[in-house]
Amino acid sequence: MAASCGNVSFLLLAMDPRVITQEELANATRFGDFIPVYKVDAVTVVKTGDSVRLAEAAAMRLVREKTTIPVPEIYNAYTDNTTGHVRIVMEFIEGDCLSNTWYQYDAQQKEHILQQLHDMFSQLRNIKGTFIGSVDGSACEDPLFEEDIGTYEPYKDEASFCQGIITALKNTLESGWVDTVCAMVGALSGHEIVLTHGDISPRNILVRDGKIVAILDWEMAGYYPEYWEYVKALYRPAWESMWIKDRAVDRVLQPYLMELAVFLHYLGWLGNVFRTASWLGDREMAELLLDQDANVLARGGHDRNALQAAFCMAGALTALAFYERTQ
C-alpha cells in the first residue's frame, strides 16, 4: 500500500514513517564520495540517490524477518517527490569494515569470522524463490544489467534469466567472442533459486570485538540461481587483497567453479588472466577444476560444447598459474 504526505510518497510497511527533511540531509555526514549513505544523527542513517531502490529495503526487511543475520532495522522507505530519489531511513550500527581489519586478525580470529559468515549465508540459501529478480518482484539490479537498469524484468526460471544476461551482453558488444560467451551462459541450468545478497565483500561487513554486527548494502539482493553468490563474490574482487589470498570466499560459500569460469569468460578479463591464475594456482584447485568436467557434464540438460568451452578457460587459467609459479 502506498500513501502520500506533502512532498513525499512512501510504502506503508508497518514501519515508523520517519521522513528526512532537506535540512537534515544537508547537515548530515556522508560516509564517502561514492557511498550514498548519510548519518543524520547518533542512531539514524539514510541511503538516498538516483540509484537507490525500494527493493533494497524490502530485501533487508525480509532478511530480518526470516533469519538471524544482523541487518540494520528499517525505519522508513519512501520516494521523495521533490527529488524523485528513494530514501531508506535505517538504524546506524557502530562497527569497523572487515576490509579494514581482516589483515590484523590471526588464523583463529579469521576462522571465527568465516564461520559466522558461513552460518549466515547458509540461512539465506534456505530461503527459496519462485522467480529470479528482486524480492519485491521488481527487475534485477546488477552491474550485468547496468546499461538498462529497470528494464530486465523478473524471470520465471533460469533459462529466461540466462537469456536476459545474453540480451544485456549483446546490447553492449557484438563480436564472435560475444557469441561464444553467450553460448556458455545459455548452457547453465539445473540450479535452485535462493535468496542472495549479490555483493558480499569485506567492505559490506561490519565487525566489532571479533563479531559480525551487520551485513550492509543489499541493493543487489534478490532471488538468484544458487551459484550467483559465489560468482559475484569473485566477479571483480581486489585480487591482491588478503581476503582473496586467504581464499575466504571458498570457506564461506560452496564453490561453483564451472559457473565462475563462465562469468570470468563473460568479463573477458584476458588482461587480468594472470591475477586470476594466481588465485587458482594450487594443485588442489587445479584438480577441482579438472574434476568439474566429468561432474558437471554428467548432469542433464547441459550443452556439452558450451560447457567444454568454459572448462577450456578454467584449464588455461590453471596452466598459466603453474607456469607463473615456476618462473
Image (spheres, grey):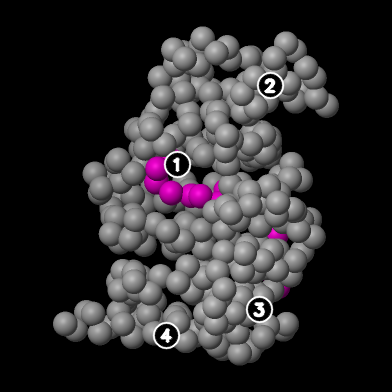
Quote the CA–CA distance across marks 4 and 2.
53 Å
- The structure residue drawn at horizontal position 55% and vertical position 69%, both measured from the top left corner, is 173
Read off the magenta span: 190-207
Indicate the amino acid at tag 3: Ala
Q: Position of residue 246 (x, y in %)?
A: 32, 60
Q: Return the mark for residue 315.
A: 4
Could you tell me how far apart the alpha carbons at marks 2 and 3 are, in whole angstroms? 44 Å
Left or right of 215 on screen, residue 95: left
Amino acid beneath label 1: Asn
Q: Residues within 10 Å of mark 3 (few under 14, many from 20)?
A: some
Mark 3 vs 4, N-terminal side: 3
Left or right of 14 on screen, residue 284: left
Q: Report the residue at 54% width, 46% height from top.
A: 120
**Secondary structure of the residue carrying numbered label 3:** loop
Q: Which mark is residue 81?
A: 2
Towards the viewer: 219 or 116:
219
Q: CA distance from mark 1 to mark 2?
A: 29 Å
**Mark 1 or 4, nearer chain start:** 1
Give the numbered dot on residue 204. 1
